[in-house]
Image: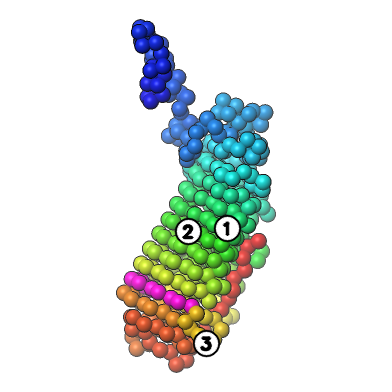
Amino acid sequence: MTILLALLSCSDKDAPIDTVDTVDTVDSVEEQLQGPCADQGWGFITSDPAAAVHVRSDGSDDGDGSSDAPVATLSKALEIAVLEERPIAVGPGSFEASLSFFGAPDGLVLQGCSPQETTLTGEAELPVVDTNGAVDVTLAGFTAQGGLISIKVWADSTVDISHIAIDGATAAGISHNGGYGVYSDIQITGTVASEQGYGYGFAMDGGGAELFDLEVSDATMAGILVGGGEIQMLGVKVSGTQPDAEGLLGRGIQLQEYANGVFADVTLTNNADAGLYALRSAVTSTNLAISGTKAGVCEDCELQTGDAAVFSRGDSNVAPGTFQIALTDSVIDGADRTGFLFSGVTAEVTGTVANDCGHLVDDKALLSQDGAVVSGDEVALLDTPLGTNLNLLPQPE
């Protein structure tokens, strides 16, 4: 209607208005504004739809990518987008991807209608989308299916990724290796273990990331793996992480190698070995909820775990102040072994509620060992330390 008024204002004010012509104008404007998505809009396209390179299942790569002449393949769309610095708008349907953004201009946008309507599929040994160092990349509004890694972010890439679903990757749903990323409203399911035995939901190796409303279910070895760098999580949920083929691990979140994690409203449910495992890392958390943590299922392993959370230096009790832990308002509901286990770290714990934990000392589910310094909630000191699996997990390549 705004466009119609603008058109009328530019016409001869003294000229009579033809009612029939006016109706035709309205219809043509509405038709022009309609897009291919279910709501007849343009999905998550936030820039001018007319500027985008359009991809449609009934398009042709002989087209110029306009809405009237869309292309058929993402490879052709990316070629045009790189040369002409245009966003990419993908319509409903399934499209082969395995895209690399190497050499892409700053600010590249790839957006579909919605995760329910637009699917990008990748080859088994390649990422579905590889940012490959591109800067200010925006991805939104699609499902990424298959691929060795569904979304690969590395080098100096900076990304804003939202409103996507990931299913069936074979090493990691998202691999973040350096750079900075904001990830929001993302669901990662069905990760299949790679030949190396892992199949993470989200894996990070250095750099920085912010996770908002991200859900991971049924990953292998770790739902979220963070090796170094800075990560913030708000409204994150990890459930049902499975052990590897030998029955090892299956942790909801693992931080390792001097990672720094800041959590709020994080929920970890029905994971194996540990809900949260922080190895040589710092954690600040508010409203952490961990339930249903099961022991590992390794038949040949003497060590039986099942800790809601473990915070460990991992080697000795020298200088426990190196790794600082701050936990506020945590709820633990069901852990085969301990609630919180502290080893070689300094921690301040307040407002913890712990129910149904298998290993209690003096009726306490919060346990300290190996020189840990813990203040706040009452913690029992263990004279004989409990063993944990001090496994550094490999990063996907």
- Residue drawn at x 63%, y 57% is 155
Q: Residue at x 41, y 60 (%)?
A: 234
Q: Can residue 162 be seen in this snapshot?
A: yes
Q: Which mark is residue 210?
A: 2
CB-based contact (under 8 Å), mark 3 and mark 1: no
Task: Look at the numbered disc 3 and give the secondary structure of its residue.
Answer: loop
Q: Quadrant of the C terminus?
A: bottom right
SS at badge 2: strand
Q: Earlier in the sequence, mark 2 or mark 1?
A: 1
Q: Residues within 10 Å of mark 2 (few under 14, many from 20)?
A: some
Amino acid type, callout 3: Val
- For the residues labelled 2 and 3, the Cα–Cα distance comes to 32 Å
Residue 255, compared with residue 158, is above or below; it is below
Residue linked to disc 1: 179
Q: What segment carries the magenta color?
A: 323-335
Q: Position of 213 compared to 302: left or right?
A: left
In the rendering, at what x and y percent does residue 295 appear? 48, 76
Q: Nearer the viewer, residue 166 or 105?
A: 105
Figure quadrant of residue 360 = bottom left
- Residue in the foreground of this view, choosing between 84 and 330: 84
Mark whose residue sits in front, 2 or 1: 1
With respect to residue 224, does 117 lie above or below? above
Between disc 3 and disc 1, whose residue precedes?
A: 1
